[in-house]
Image (cartoon, helix red, strand yellow):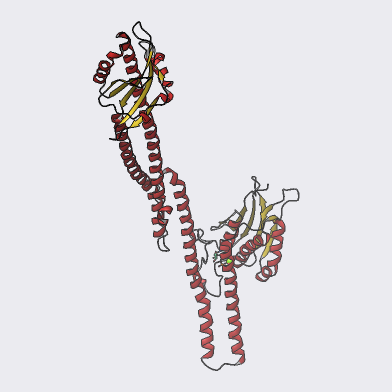
Amino acid sequence: MKALRHSLTAQIAAAIALVSGLTILLLGMLMDSRLGGELREETELLLLSNLALLRDDLAAAGNDPAVLPRLVTRAGRRTPRLHLEVVEERDAALLARSPQFDVPQEALPRQLLAAQLLPPDPTRRQMDQLRDQLGQSTVTWQAADGGRYRLLRARLPLPATQERPARVLLATLAVETTPSRALRDRNRRELAIALCAAGVLSALLGLGIARRIVVSVRRFGATASRVGASDLHERMPLEGAPAEMAESTRAFNRMLDRLQDSFERLSAFSSDLAHDLRTPLGNLMGEAQVALSRPRTADEYRAVLESAVEEYERLSRMITNMLFLARADNQPAPAAHWVDLDQALQRVAGYFELLAEERGVVLRLDMQSPDGVPARAWADESMLVRALGNLVSNALQHTPPGSAIRLRARVAADRSCTLEVANDGPPIPAEHQPHIFQRFYRVDASRQGSASGSGLGLAIVHSIMEMHGGTVAVDSGAGRTTTFTLRFSGNPLT
Ligand SMILES: Nc1ncnc2c1ncn2[C@@H]1O[C@H](COP(=O)(O)OP(=O)(O)OP(=O)(O)O)[C@@H](O)[C@H]1O
Ligand SMILES: [Mg+2]
């Protein structure tokens, strides 16, 4: 029962069955009452017209009650369902009666219709008007054998003649309505059957419609359950889906796209991670094992430990960088404010001054002219400095001693700002350029190990720029300076 209440199909089918059942029931009740009304109308007209005939025939016979038995027989012959009884009002003396007339006294209508109200040769309209005034002078009666009758009682005043004083007769007319009743009962039975059939049919129809609706919902579920870690490529087919489901289908597919993308990035990241942690750990282990293979002097141990500390630092840096990237993946927009790009460049140059001097490289700041539009970016300052720092650190590694690294901030015509870090030195081969922003990607694979970086610096730059809605690009080639450009889009507040 509970399952049915929660089933969309059952609910839709039940609703359709209920609505069509109720409609048919209402229509049926309306038709039944119309039929009942019409049958009653017909019976009453029959009673009134026979009363009019009796009165007129009696008048034609000079109002002589002796003709009554003949008139009653004739009326019975004319209308087989009609039975009559005529008595004197004064003493209830019986004047004429149809053979089957046996209505008990207490069943007779209390109210009497005055027959003179009936106009001679009444029109249909006059009859209808009179029918409306019948009120209590017509009643229904059920005989002991189950036969049903409608009764009408009327006063028939006979004017005085030379032979007879004026007198009043009471005429009772009874029309058997059993056949009409049977017709109505049959009608009701048929209605009940139609009702049941309509209920069943519309429930089936509802079931069909609901199934069609639910089938697309089911397809959703089926696809969703097929989607596992190994087959994230599974998508909901758009063709064949109902128009109402198209948007949810697209949203579902977009969600799968995002999941697949994140999942692939995550697996690539973890495999890179395992690979890159193995090298320094292997170095550390190898050095320690060699050191332990025989007794060493204190100086030798010291040298081993010093080399280990270098490796630990590298590992620690790598883990910090990876943590930053992992957080950046799920991070919302950074805490941004207006950052003066010239100042940011000066800060970064300050950090790298000593290192540059050590390498014999000059850091050259290309500052904005004082009357120019100040280069500003809507950014998280520490992240911007970190991105710049990674670029400068790379440039320092690839710039030959005696040359310069140029740092420059620029405002474009569309008010977007760019930061450039340019250095001379060996260019980055074109085939590597599309990959250098990927995690753990290094151009010179042979330099893997403690001597070189971990290949995360540019991935961090890329990730920081993505968080800011900006881009990072590289321009490098034979005979050209290698230039990295950070572009901050025209921010939302300008
Ligand atoms: N200015 C540059 N000139 C030449 N090659 C560069 C320059 N900057 C980066 N590269 C190349 O791009 C690769 C990726 O740089 P990235 O900063 O991501 O890694 P890394 O410097 O090797 O390591 P990390 O920055 O994590 O210590 C480097 O291995 C280097 O070969
Ligand atoms: Mg680097």
Can you give x and y, in whole percent of width and height, for residue 63 in the image?
32, 10
Determine whether, in the image, residue 269 is placed left or right of residue 365.
left
Name the residue at the left extreme: 77
> Does residue 108 appear in this view?
yes
Q: Is residue 259 above or below residue 162?
A: below
Residue at point 44%, 46% (across, down): 245
Question: Residue 51: x percent and y percent?
Answer: 34, 17
State which image quarter holds ligand 2: bottom right
Q: Residue furthest bottom?
A: 295
Whether residue 396 sits left or right of residue 69 in the image: it is right
Q: How many marks?
A: 0
Q: Is residue 378 left or right of residue 62?
A: right
Q: Quadrant of residue 457?
A: bottom right
Give the camera-side residue of 362 and 416: 416
- Residue placed most toward the observer, 204 or 167: 167
Where is 61 relative to 487, above or below?
above
Up/down of 253 relative to 16, above or below? below
Name the residue: 62% across, 61% down: 387
Res 241 seen here: no
Front residue of 230 and 281: 230
Residue 324 sits in quarter: bottom right
Does residue 90 appear to the left or right of 325 in the view shown?
Answer: left
Task: Give how far across and how far down residue 429 sits, in percent.
Answer: 51, 61
* Extreme-top residue of the structure: 162
Q: Position of residue 82 (x, y in %)?
A: 29, 23
